[in-house]
Image (cartoon, rainbow, N blue to C red):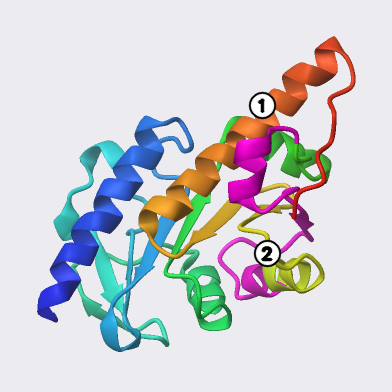
């Protein structure tokens, strides 16, 4: 393992724990990845509850998904992470959540509108919906990239009937995008109980 990889593995673990603490995932659902040097990627393991996870459980793989370091198997959604990181050189980290309000919009196949100025600016505007793709398949990354080609500048995309994926230059930004996207989804759902929320022209 490269010396710098240890710090990135620790940061991935801390981000995963924060994602769990903030209610964006439960048990072992969702996943986190971040670039290391030399094309390597640090990623959360599969089927391990966040409450039991330690930094030593974070796996390092190469660009083809071959495990280089770590005793556990990487997340089953590793192909999505590797595909997105390969296609988006400006992105340094990917956070995939199953947060309840975002999932509700994803289940309906409806985008999350830009309704909160600050949050919408960070997220890049409306959170669009990618078509249905099989979990764990490379097609998930393909579906997300199809959306991003028509909606450049977005930093979060809903996965039809699945969840949300958020990107950032680093882990802190990717986690913030996921949090703000969930907040926009929750605010929209509540605002529609009161009246008609104002949609902002952002992104």
Q: In which quarter of the image is residue 115?
A: top right
Using the numbered discs, state the Cα–Cα distance from disc 1 to disc 2 in whole angstroms: 22 Å
Q: Is residue 55 above or below residue 90?
A: above
Q: Please give the name of the residue rendered at 17% of the width and 55% of the height, measured from the top-left corner.
A: 55
Residue beneath disc 1: 186
Q: Position of residue 186 (x, y in %)?
A: 66, 26
Q: Residue furthest right?
A: 196
Q: Residue furthest top?
A: 194
158 drawn magenta: no
Mark 2 or mark 1, which is nearer the start of the sequence?
A: 2
Q: Is mark 1 on a helix, strand or loop?
A: helix
Residue beneath disc 2: 153
* Label 1 close to label 2 by CB (< 8 Å): no
Q: How many labels does the image show?
A: 2
Left or right of 54? Residue 50 is: right
Q: Nearer the viewer, residue 153 or 86?
A: 153
Asked if residue 114 shows in the view, the reply is yes
Asked if residue 49 shows in the view, the reply is no
Q: How crowded is mark 1: few (under 14 residues within 10 Å), some or many (20 or more)?
A: some
Q: How crowded is mark 2: few (under 14 residues within 10 Å), some or many (20 or more)?
A: few
Left or right of 184? Residue 99 is: left
Identify the magenta region.
115-142
Q: In this view, does 179 lie above or below 12?
A: above
Q: What element carries label 2?
A: loop
Q: In this view, does 202 lie above or below 139?
A: above
Left or right of 22? Residue 103 is: right
135 drawn magenta: yes
């Amino acid at each position: 393992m490269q010396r710098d990889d240890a710090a990135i593995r620790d940061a991935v673990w801390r981000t995963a724990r924060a994602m769990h603490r903030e209610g964006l995932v439960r048990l072992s659902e969702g996943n986190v990845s971040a670039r290391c040097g030399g094309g390597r990627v640090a990623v959360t393991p599969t089927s391990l509850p966040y409450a039991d996870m330690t930094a030593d459980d974070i796996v390092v793989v190469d660009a083809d998904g071959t495990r280089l370091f770590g005793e556990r198997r990487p997340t089953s959604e590793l192909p999505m992470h590797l595909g997105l990181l390969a296609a988006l050189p400006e992105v340094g980290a990917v956070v995939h959540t199953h947060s309840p309000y975002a999932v509700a919009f994803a289940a309906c196949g409806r985008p999350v509108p830009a309704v909160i100025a600050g949050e919408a600016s960070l997220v890049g505007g409306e959170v669009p919906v990618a078509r249905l793709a099989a979990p764990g398949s490379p097609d998930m990354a393909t579906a997300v990239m199809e959306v991003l080609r028509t909606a450049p500048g977005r930093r979060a995309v809903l996965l039809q009937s699945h969840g949300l994926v958020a990107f950032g230059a680093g882990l802190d930004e990717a986690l913030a995008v996921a949090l703000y996207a969930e907040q926009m989804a929750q605010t929209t759902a509540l605002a529609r109980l009161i009246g008609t929320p104002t949609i902002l022209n952002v992104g």
